Amino acid sequence: MPDPLVLKKYSNRRLYDTRNSRYVTLEDVSTMIRSGEQVQIHDATTGEDVTAFILTQIVLEAAKRRNSLLPESVLHLIIRYGDNALGEFFEKYFQKTLQNYLETKKAFDQQFGKWLDMGMEMPRRMPEMMSGVSTIEGMIKMFGLPKPPASKRPDSEHPDPSDNPDSEQKPKA
């Protein structure tokens, strides 16, 4: 993983990008992170790492624009039980849960895309799969299933009675 982009936070709340030698806004930092950049933010005076504080500020600013971040009931619980319980929850569970969700979502999106592609191909492929074969046998072949035994095949459900020596044959009139 490449080195994180180091930003300095000045007392006037401005952020300075040390790699590109320019001032950036919270929105700029948000865009950098969305594009995959890792950032590390230090107080310019004390050298203290304020990354978590600034990232929280970005999240809260976005929530303010949408007028919600968490449901009120969750916010009440956070206040009631303090930041220790919240910190422990985020440290132990939330990050892993979010990572698992994103990985599962990505896998599902890829699989769903494959199904859509297969569905789009079906009208083109169906005639070649069905040519010269009965419909049931074509479907069996298409899905890679084993052929059913002869007694279960659709064309053998009503066999010719003359093929069965045990059946009574009526004399022809």
Image (tube, rainbow, N blue to C red):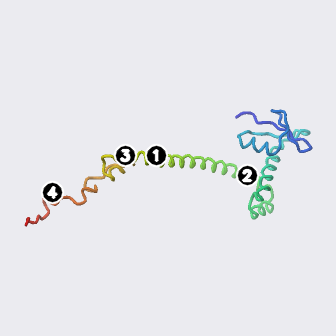
Left or right, 117 with respect to 151, comes to right
Q: Quadrant of residue 65?
A: bottom right
CA distance separating discs 3 and 4 = 32 Å
Position in image of residue 41 (x %, y %): 82, 40
- For badge 2, the amino acid type reads Phe
Q: Nearer the viewer, mark 4 or mark 2?
A: 4
Position in image of residue 72 (x %, y %): 76, 63
Query: Which residue corresponds to mark 1?
Result: 121
Query: Which residue corresponds to mark 3?
Result: 129
Q: Regarding mark 1 in the picture, which secondary structure is present there?
A: helix
Near mark 3 (Cα within 10 A), the count class, few <14, some 14-19 or many ≥20, is: some
Residue located 77% across and 62% down the image: 77
3 up-or-down from 70: above or below: above
Label of residue 90 in the image: 2
- For badge 1, the amino acid type reads Glu
Residue located 77% across and 51% down the image: 59
